[in-house]
């Protein structure tokens, strides 16, 4: 047979052509459709970024109003999804429930799953982006044993999410605009990141012609792991474990020890060999949120000290290990009141437009089923023993 390149981990393989997101890992640059992430985080909002990723251009005022209105009017989920939710154990990990609930969208919304029909694809994109925060909040309320909150059409996307998460029928409080803005930024900073493990999973699943909700459920599964989206949860668990500034040196030594599986969570990236540009914006947002809430978080102090020490340590310097997006997001989410187990679910809600845009980009042009080859290292042919 032919000669194949052996590239475990896809260190040097481009799996597709794409016009959506550009990353320069050496310089620490991230552009969506050409626009720098820093400018989008400052001047745009999440729904505008969704539009940009999905359609290729920023919307004009009228397009933005229409898009926002359509998304807002699709935030409710089929009532029967509540019965589906009720089948899960309340103490299940929220990502386990999220995988199931998003996969189930293809069971509840199967009237528009013709992948060759552009209108159907648009309807599915709308459904996905509008319902992700609703599903995420349902997963949380269910885990808490609290009544589910319906979305409200008078609230913005991120206000609505915080309303469904933290309000109760007995007490509906206005949403703090600083926290809503921070939530929106977190969604923007997670919106897309080209061919990462979960997006590549979505594309690979989609290359067989599977429907987008099923493919995105597969992406959510890939995101769950601690080397990918699960890192935001792992960062806070790590900070808990370190406990105090006086223990940092011990944990840095563990991270450098090749016989110890411990890694500095929230540090390092396959593509960035420089500061993750998302981490800079995240840190700034973190300061804003803690300032607004008047929180003096010892974990933030610990995180900052850890960052300072690691950035000076030759081990991290030589390997270009810098803080990534997950390093600060957990501290913001914690300050907002979101429990650690929910962090990766929030990442999934933010990544939804990126996953959909990549699936849609692939499906809208000629594509092949993804089918990697292997280097077989097992037995050569042998005969079944005579017994
Ligand atoms: N702590 C200690 N050492 C590290 C770390 C770390 N966090 N990350 C990489 N290294 C070392 C690694 O041991 C290797 O050392 P050596 O060359 O001596 O064998 C070197 O740095 C290169 O690392 P690698 O594992 O070959 O790099 P990779 O591209 O395969 O892995 C990574 C990238 C993100 C999986 C890894 O850096 C990691 O596990 N980081 C911690 C988890 C994390 O924060 N993940 C979030 C990624 S960003 C957003 C997202 O995707 O969710």
Image (cartoon, rainbow, N blue to C red):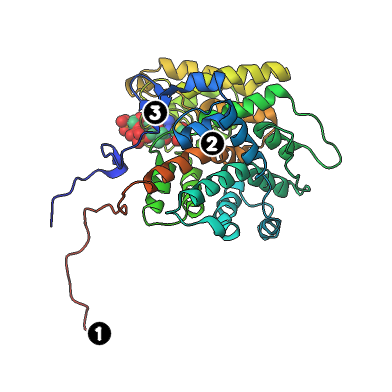
Residue drawn where x is 58% and y is 56% of the image: 109
Q: Which numbered marker is on residue 256? A: 3
Please state the horizontal and vertical placement of residue 54, each as a whole percent of the image: 47, 37
Residue 33 lies, with reference to residue 198, above or below; the image says above
The residue at 67%/19% (across/down) is 290
Q: Residue 81: image x %, image y %? A: 67, 56
In 3D space, how far apart are the residues under numbered discs 2 and 3 (Cα atoms)?
A: 18 Å
Among the 4 quarters of the image, the one containing residue 159: top right
Locate the C terminus by quadrant. bottom left
- Upstream in sequence: badge 2 or badge 3: 2
Nearest the viewer among 15 and 237 is: 15
Mark 2 — residue?
234
Q: In front: 182, or 6?
A: 182
Give the label, 2 or 1, closer to the camera. Answer: 2
Say above or below: 257 vs 282. Answer: below
Is label 2 in a helix, a strand or a loop? helix
Q: Which residue is mark 1?
A: 387
- Which mark sits nearer the N-terminus, 1 or 3? 3
Question: In terms of sequence position, does the residue under pointer 2 or pointer 1 come before the other?
Answer: 2
Image: 44 above or below 172? above
Mark 3 Cα within 10 Å, few/some/many (few <14, many 20+)?
some
Q: Is mark 3 within 8 Å of ligand 1?
A: yes
Q: Is residue 258 visible?
A: no
Q: Residue furthest front?
A: 62
């Amino acid at each position: 047979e032919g000669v194949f390149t052996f590239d475990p981990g896809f260190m040097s393989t481009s799996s597709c052509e794409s016009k959506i997101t550009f990353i320069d890992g050496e310089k620490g640059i991230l552009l969506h459709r050409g626009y720098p992430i820093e400018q989008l985080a400052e001047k745009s909002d999440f729904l505008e970024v969704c539009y940009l990723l999905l359609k290729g251009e920023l919307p004009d005022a009228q397009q933005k109003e229409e898009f926002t209105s359509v998304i807002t009017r699709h935030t409710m989920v089929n009532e029967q999804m509540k019965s589906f939710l009720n089948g899960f154990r309340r103490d299940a990990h929220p990502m386990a429930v999220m995988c199931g609930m998003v996969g189930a969208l293809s069971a509840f919304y199967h009237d528009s799953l013709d992948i060759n029909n552009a209108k159907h694809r648009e309807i599915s994109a709308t459904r996905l982006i509008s319902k992700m925060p609703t599903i995420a909040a349902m997963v949380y309320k269910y885990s808490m044993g609290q009544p589910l909150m319906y979305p409200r059409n008078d609230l913005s996307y991120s206000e609505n999410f915080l309303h469904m998460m933290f309000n109760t029928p007995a007490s509906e409080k206005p949403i703090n605009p600083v926290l809503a803005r921070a939530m929106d930024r977190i969604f923007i900073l997670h919106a897309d990141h080209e061919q990462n493990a979960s997006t590549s999973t979505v594309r690979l699943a989609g290359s067989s012609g599977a429907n987008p909700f099923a493919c995105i459920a597969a992406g959510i599964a890939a995101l769950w792991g601690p080397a990918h989206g699960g890192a935001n949860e792992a960062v806070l668990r790590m900070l808990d474990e370190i406990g105090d500034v006086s223990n940092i040196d011990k944990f840095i030594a563990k991270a450098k020890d090749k016989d110890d599986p411990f890694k500095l969570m929230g540090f390092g990236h396959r593509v960035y060999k420089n500061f993750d540009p998302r981490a800079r914006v995240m840190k700034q947002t973190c300061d804003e949120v803690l300032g607004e809430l008047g929180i003096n978080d010892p974990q933030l102090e610990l995180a900052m000290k850890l960052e300072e020490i690691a950035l000076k340590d030759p081990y991290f310097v030589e390997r270009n290990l810098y803080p990534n997006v997950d390093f600060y997001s957990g501290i913001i989410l914690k300050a907002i009141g979101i429990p650690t187990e929910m962090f990766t679910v929030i990442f999934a809600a933010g990544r939804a437009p990126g996953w959909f845009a990549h699936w849609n980009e692939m499906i809208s042009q000629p594509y092949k089923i993804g089918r990697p080859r292997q280097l077989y290292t097992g037995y050569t042919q042998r005969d079944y023993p005579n017994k």
